[in-house]
């Protein structure tokens, strides 16, 4: 049987001409496309090949796997590559398993999540165990102190780590999206491509005194977003949410949400949001931008026009030149 060729992902050409983040402007212009960050990473060498054996800390990186499992076949001295058993919170596993089960529905799923805002469709769920968060923070600290090349997480955040630089994109984030987030998001956000998530961009952002303290209002280059608090000890830095960026009075009333270590906030990428100033300590968060080519191929969320496609590496910005094959759905009435 012939093996299907890997899909080629693209970016929209608007990323270098229109989408510049400006913290002093509330709604317009929109934030920059992630490929601006990726371009900077390539120039600094962060996206180029590097010796995986030089990664400091406890991680022993396995070879990339094409299997949709979270467990590495290589030896692992910490739970980073075994998240279903040692890293994922039982509540998160239960919510994902329920979502993938026959007869599941939104009402049943909402009983397994915390509804932060029904109106804004913002939800919270434990994602990682406290032990896994601590282990990941240790690895991030080792990587931060190393002399390995690093790119910025995005053009708004100056400090943090791209998950592919840490070697955790393929063994951790991709299976997390495919096996756990996909069924869950399909029930929560069917109108936003939740059942068709086929790519992502994942990064860790760091806030600390003398570095980034806050984040201006913006919306994400994604259909959906997962934002998980990893720690450390800090005060301040709460997330705030407005309405959808298309709404005329999108920031008339905002909602503040405190961070809970290990817990993830789920929201639509077009929801305006930001972070209040950090007062003390350090705050680290894992952010996963979840993308559905079936949605963004029709309209780029950054320039709000039909995307002008440019070939790119990896997942690009989640656009594809070809539409995915149609899926036959049998609806019982």
Image (cartoon, rainbow, N blue to C red):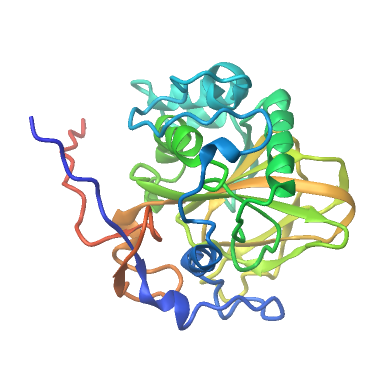
Query: Which residue does the image show at 83% across and 61% down from the upper left?
Result: 277
- Left or right of 317? Residue 294 is left
Q: Is residue 118 above or below residue 261?
A: below
Most extreme residue toward the bottom, as rendered? 17
Q: Quadrant of the C terminus?
A: top left
In the rendered image, residue 168, in percent from the top left (x then y), is placed at 53, 38
Q: Is residue 24 above or below residue 310?
A: below
Hey, which quadrant is residue 99 in on the image? top left
Query: Which residue does the image show at 45% across and 55% down from the upper left?
Result: 223
Q: Quadrant of the N terminus?
A: top left
Hey, which quadrant is residue 320 in on the image? bottom left
Hey, which quadrant is residue 139 in on the image? top right
Most extreme residue toward the right, as rendered? 280
Q: Nearer the viewer, residue 15 or 185?
A: 15
Q: Is residue 121 above or below residue 29?
A: above
Most extreme residue toward the left, as rendered? 1
- Left or right of 271? Residue 132 is right
In the rendered image, residue 57, in percent from the top left (x then y), is placed at 69, 33
**Res 67 visible:** yes
In the rendered image, residue 209, in percent from the top left (x then y), is placed at 88, 58
Query: Which residue does the image show at 76% across and 43% down from the upper left?
Result: 259
How many numbered discs sit on the rendered protein?
A: 0
């Amino acid at each position: 049987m012939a093996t299907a060729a890997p899909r080629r992902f693209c970016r929209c050409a608007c990323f270098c001409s229109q989408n510049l983040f400006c913290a002093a402007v509330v709604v317009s212009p929109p934030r920059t496309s992630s490929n601006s960050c990726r371009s900077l990473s390539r120039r600094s060498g962060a996206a180029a090949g590097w010796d995986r054996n030089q990664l400091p800390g406890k991680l022993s990186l396995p070879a990339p796997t094409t299997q949709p499992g979270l467990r590495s076949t290589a030896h692992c001295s910490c739970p980073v590559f075994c998240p279903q058993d040692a890293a994922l919170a039982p509540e998160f596993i239960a919510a994902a398993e329920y979502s993938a089960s026959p007869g599941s529905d939104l009402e049943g799923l909402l009983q397994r999540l915390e509804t932060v805002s029904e109106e804004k469709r913002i939800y919270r769920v434990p994602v990682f165990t406290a032990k896994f968060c601590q282990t990941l923070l240790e690895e991030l600290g080792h990587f931060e102190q190393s002399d390995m090349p690093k790119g910025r997480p995005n053009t708004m955040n100056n400090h943090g780590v791209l998950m592919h630089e840490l070697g955790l994109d393929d063994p951790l984030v991709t299976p997390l999206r495919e096996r756990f987030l996909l069924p869950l998001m399909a029930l929560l956000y069917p109108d936003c491509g939740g059942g068709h998530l086929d790519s992502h961009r994942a990064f860790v952002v760091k806030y600390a005194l003398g570095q980034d303290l806050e984040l201006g209002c913006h919306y994400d280059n994604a259909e959906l977003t997962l934002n998980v608090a990893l720690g450390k000890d800090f005060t301040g830095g709460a997330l705030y949410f407005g309405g959808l960026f298309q709404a005329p009075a999108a920031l008339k009333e905002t909602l503040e949400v405190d961070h809970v270590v290990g817990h993830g906030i789920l929201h639509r990428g077009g929801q305006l949001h930001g972070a209040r100033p950090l007062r003390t300590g350090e705050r680290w968060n894992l952010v996963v931008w979840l993308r559905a080519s079936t949605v963004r191929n029709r309209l780029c969320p950054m320039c709000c026009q039909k995307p002008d496609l440019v070939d790119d590496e990896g997942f690009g910005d989640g656009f594809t030149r070809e539409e995915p094959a149609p899926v036959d759905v049998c609806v019982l009435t």
